[in-house]
Amino acid sequence: VTTATAAVAGHVDPVASPPRTLRLALLGFGSVGSAVARLAHDSPLHPARVTAALVRDVRRDRGPASQGIALASDASSVLASRPDVVIEALGGREPARSLVIDALARGVPVVSANKSLLAWHGDEVLAAAEAARTPLRYEAAVMAGVPFLCAFADRPFAASVHGFTAIVNGTCNFILSAMSGGRATRQQALAEAQRRGYAEPDPSSDVSGRDAAEKLCVLLRHFGGWSTTPNDLDVEGIERIDAEDLEQAREFGGVIRPLVSAAWECERPWAIAAPAFIPRTHPLAAVQGVDSGIVIRTRYHGVLTFGGPGAGPEVTAATLLDDAVTAARPGSSFACAASRRPSWDAPATSWFVRVGAARLPDERDTADLLGSHGVWLKRTSPRDTRRGGERQWALVHADTKPRIESALAALGRAACCDTLAIRAMEA
Ligand SMILES: NC(=O)c1ccc[n+]([C@@H]2O[C@H](COP(=O)([O-])OP(=O)(O)OC[C@H]3O[C@@H](n4cnc5c(N)ncnc54)[C@H](OP(=O)(O)O)[C@@H]3O)[C@@H](O)[C@H]2O)c1
């Protein structure tokens, strides 16, 4: 067993010479950064030591995890500590972007958990890595606890991917899972997610779909070589979904999940970040709570599925340390900048639709009005009066978003209805 294999496989071989202790510099010492320091210190799997860490407030007590680590609010002193690898766990766009580029320009490999950095500045930071011929790894930026991006590294046939569908936001998946079965309202589910540390005090990035859109950009870049920012994408949040929607989804034989999905070997490449109704038989229907999952469509290997914990400081730290060990190896490959710039479409899909009003129009009149806009009902629910007034749900045949929206707007005007449309995806 070689040293490298021993470290990767998690076995400690007493005969092999121990690997050299990795010197790590942390940018950020919050939930993730401090978990990296604890794991590097405690784990026998690979000797590693955090030498310096960048923080905003050097006076704050950071507990035992910070012992022996030079905390600084000045990035240049952290980068000057001669680390083997820099681990970026700051979050956000700046100063992460400048510091990552600076470290790479000095020839220091960088490992990052920062989806915002990759989504908004991916071209720039990957070009910096390419120019310096220095690794930049970002396994922890999407589904931090599921090491799946590395499964495709240096494997061009496996990496011939033409699309994927994934649950990448554990907070939204937790909220929708907790709401289904009438177990909690959206507010109660969100409060519980915050209590358990899954959701930020300000959850707007999660519930609006922004976090998922950033992760979608990282996946599009990784699997398709697409240069994309969230501004290029069709993004929707989970704000308007309520417990009765989830109940009705179950009656229709499915569940509602916060998805990102894309396909590019088709006439019009498309990419979306939006909640969607999926049938119970869909592999992602079983992904519940804070877990994440991805179904990857490949040319040679068919459909590949990965799943597991999406986030959490400890598991993210473990993924960052694995990336650091890999990045420090001589000859470790470096990611290349994306070159393709598509114009992403939004696909025509079936739809899960809700209409509500003090008194809904006759069902045949509703079907006629929608049909006059080219929108056709597949299946309808009984009327529901539990919230006062009347509500009804339907599955609608495949159509584009503009056509669904204009048909529902016409219905809203004609019958004073409130409407909601969620995509219904088959695969
Ligand atoms: N938490 C998770 O489960 C998870 C999972 C996957 C990926 N991630 C990613 O990991 C990254 C870090 O997340 P986190 O939860 O650890 O965040 P966090 O708890 O807010 O920690 C951020 C750290 O960065 C420092 N920092 C921020 N801006 C700075 C600046 N301008 N100058 C100096 N220091 C600065 C903060 O310093 P102070 O301590 O002095 O405020 C803090 O130590 C993010 O990109 C996040 O998306 C997190």
Image (cartoon, rainbow, N blue to C red):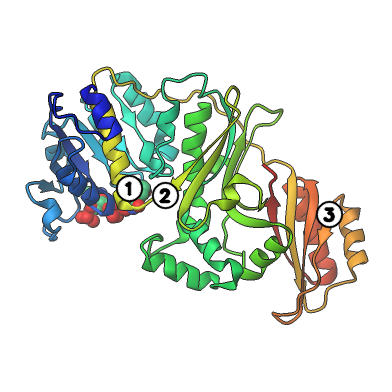
- Disc 1 marks a residue whose amino acid type is Val
Is there any visible trace of residue 77 in the rendered image? yes
Residue matched to label 3: 378
Position of 148 relative to 272 (above/below): above
Query: What is the quadrant of residue 118 in the picture?
Result: top left
Image quarter of the C terminus: top right
Q: Secondary structure at mark 3?
A: strand
Disc number for residue 309:
2
Name the residue furthest left: 68
- Of the image marks 1 and 3, the number of the one nearer the N terminus: 1
Residue occupying image coordinates x 51% and y 45%? 293
Left or right: 213, with 407 as reference point = left
Left or right: 287, with 28 as reference point = right
Is there any visible trace of residue 110 in the rendered image? no
Instruction: Report if the CB atoms under discs 1 and 2 are less than 8 Å apart.
Output: yes
Single out the mark in the foreground, 3 or 2.
2
- Disc 2 marks a residue whose amino acid type is Pro
Disc number for residue 315:
1
Circle 2 crowding by C-alpha within 10 Å: few under 14, some 14–19, many from 20:
some
- Disc 1 under 8 Å from ligand 1? The reply is yes
Residue occupying image coordinates x 69% and y 31%? 268
